[in-house]
Image (cartoon, rainbow, N blue to C red):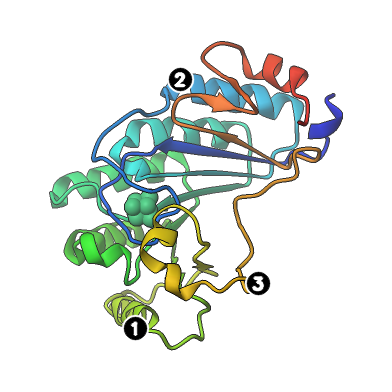
Amino acid sequence: MNEYLKNLNRIEFVVTWACTGRCKHCSEGEHTNCGEHLDAEVAAQAVYDICKLYPIQSLMTFGGEPLLYPETVCRIHQAAKEMGIPQRDLITNGYFSKDEKRIREVVHMLAVSGVKDILLSVDAFHQETIPLEPVKCFAESVKAEGISLRLSPAWLVSKEDDNPYNVRTKEVMAEFDYLNIPEGSGNVIFPSGNAIKYLGEYFKEGELPVNPYEDDPKDIRAIGFDPNGDVLGSNVYRNSIVEIMDGYKAE
Ligand code: SF4
């Protein structure tokens, strides 16, 4: 077993960088509405292979907006369920279609595939470009299917800070009161990508929030796949994930 991966217990898939949102705080900069996405079978095979070697406890799919490619998301979660990964999460902005029938159909697919927890990104930033009605329809469908759902707002500076964005975020969250959805831990925006470009004035030198995107390269606990297949400095379309994990060396 590769020494650098001895504590590996989590798999993360960025299904696509394409997104329906154009959020000011996005750590990934600009997005387009459609684009490269992971191959469903390659991703599922990676789940099978990793789980045969490591006791994976959690798996997450996110983006971009992962539900632009629901078949891929579902295939990954189906593999995770088959392999007995206990925690199986999806992060979404809830907006991939305006068609109520399609929204319900996709949510049903998620339930069947075994998605356990959905974190719904709603806040001042998302709702500048993402309409609330389809997101509410999505949330209602998730509840109807019995999938656990939490609101996952992004706070600016801190949850307690009284800036106009946080005030607006509380208003947006109140729109979901009728569904009684608990709030997840949410996150505090980290200054990278669009967040620096549009919100730079809120970040002070020496008072930066914790960067949630960093992992120690000598102690990889979460293995992350990009939409183009990049993983651990290699690519899963060129080599099998087992070869990639065997050959991984910390920089
Ligand atoms: S923050 Fe999320 S929803 Fe907003 S643009 Fe970035 S990936 Fe899309």
Local SS, label 1: helix
Q: Eyeballing the image, is 160 above or below 37? A: below
Q: Position of residue 129 (x, y in %)?
A: 22, 60
- Disc 2/disc 1 C-alpha distance (Å): 44 Å
Q: Which mark is residue 65?
A: none
Q: Eyeballing the image, is 211 above or below 17? A: below
Q: Residue at x 43, y 73 (%)?
A: 201
Q: Which mark is residue 206?
A: 3
Q: Are the two marked residues, 3 and 2, in contact with CB atoms closer than 8 angstroms?
A: no
Q: Position of residue 238 (x, y in %)?
A: 55, 11
Q: Which mark is residue 41?
A: 2
Is 32 or 205 nearer to us in this picture? 205
Q: Position of residue 56 (x, y in %)?
A: 69, 39
Instruction: Report whether residue 9 is seen.
Output: yes
Q: Is residue 191 left or right of residue 174?
A: right
Most extreme residue toward the top is: 238
